[in-house]
Image: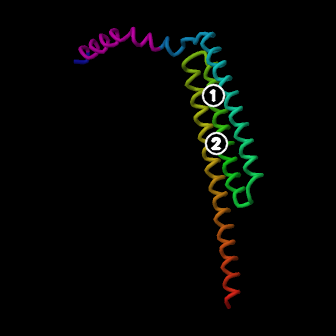
Amino acid sequence: MTTETNNVFETVKEAFAPVTDAFKNLQNMEVPEAAREFVKRSANTAKERAADVYAGSEKVTAAIETAVADSVSEAAKISRNIQQAIYQDAEAFFAGIDKLASAKSLNEAVQIQSDLARARGEVFISRAKSTTEYLGKLVANGAKTAQDNFAKVYNKTA
């Protein structure tokens, strides 16, 4: 029975040898330089356009901040932070594409993608922590203002 099992195993192994060889070659297959350059140029163009959009949104936010009262300036500050985060994400995305475009093999591309995913996860955690701290301060300040206003009203009636 062992000999029979070995024969079947060898037959299957031989039958799939071309597929196995092709997969090994695919992992080490080089990406043509022209393709990498095309992706890099496209990513740089998109990155420049994202920078232009970000600059425009900064101008609009600054105009709104100067035109409205202090109570709205907090909303403008939040808007500015969101715009900045979106721009940073776009920059990171295009930088990632640029790095991936420089990969010369599938293995290298997988490693680069793994590193990029890890870095984006760290950024996400950092932003979540900052947002939590910021919202905590807003709630505390709002509660303090409400308490002060309530105390003023209470003292006037008493």
Q: Quadrant of the N terminus?
A: top left
Give coordinates of residue 76: x percent, y percent: 69, 52
Q: Quadrant of the C terminus?
A: bottom right
Foreground residue among 102 and 139: 139
Magenta stretch, main secondary structure class:
helix
Label 1 sits on what residue type? Gly
Q: CA distance from mark 1 to mark 2?
A: 14 Å
Q: Which class describes the residues within 10 Å of circle 2: few (<14), some (14-19), or many (20+)?
A: few
Give coordinates of residue 28: x percent, y percent: 54, 13
- The range drawn in magenta is 3-23
> What is the number of the mark on residue 123?
2
Secondary element under disc 2, as helix, strand or loop, is helix
Give coordinates of residue 67: x percent, y percent: 75, 52
Q: Is residue 77 above or below residue 88?
A: below
> What is the number of the mark on residue 7?
none
Foreground residue among 142 and 158: 158
Q: Is residue 71 above or below residue 130?
A: below
Foreground residue among 32 and 76: 76
Label 2 sits on what residue type? Val
Secondary element under disc 1, as helix, strand or loop, is helix
Q: Is residue 120 left or right of residue 7?
A: right
Q: Residue furthest bottom?
A: 158
Magenta span includes 40: no
For the point 61% across and 15% down, the residue is 104
For the point 63% across and 15% down, the residue is 38
Q: Is residue 6 above or below residue 123?
A: above
Residue occupied by mark 1: 96
Q: Quadrant of residue 73?
A: bottom right
For the point 39% across and 12% down, the residue is 19
Q: Which class describes the residues within 10 Å of circle 1: few (<14), some (14-19), or many (20+)?
A: some
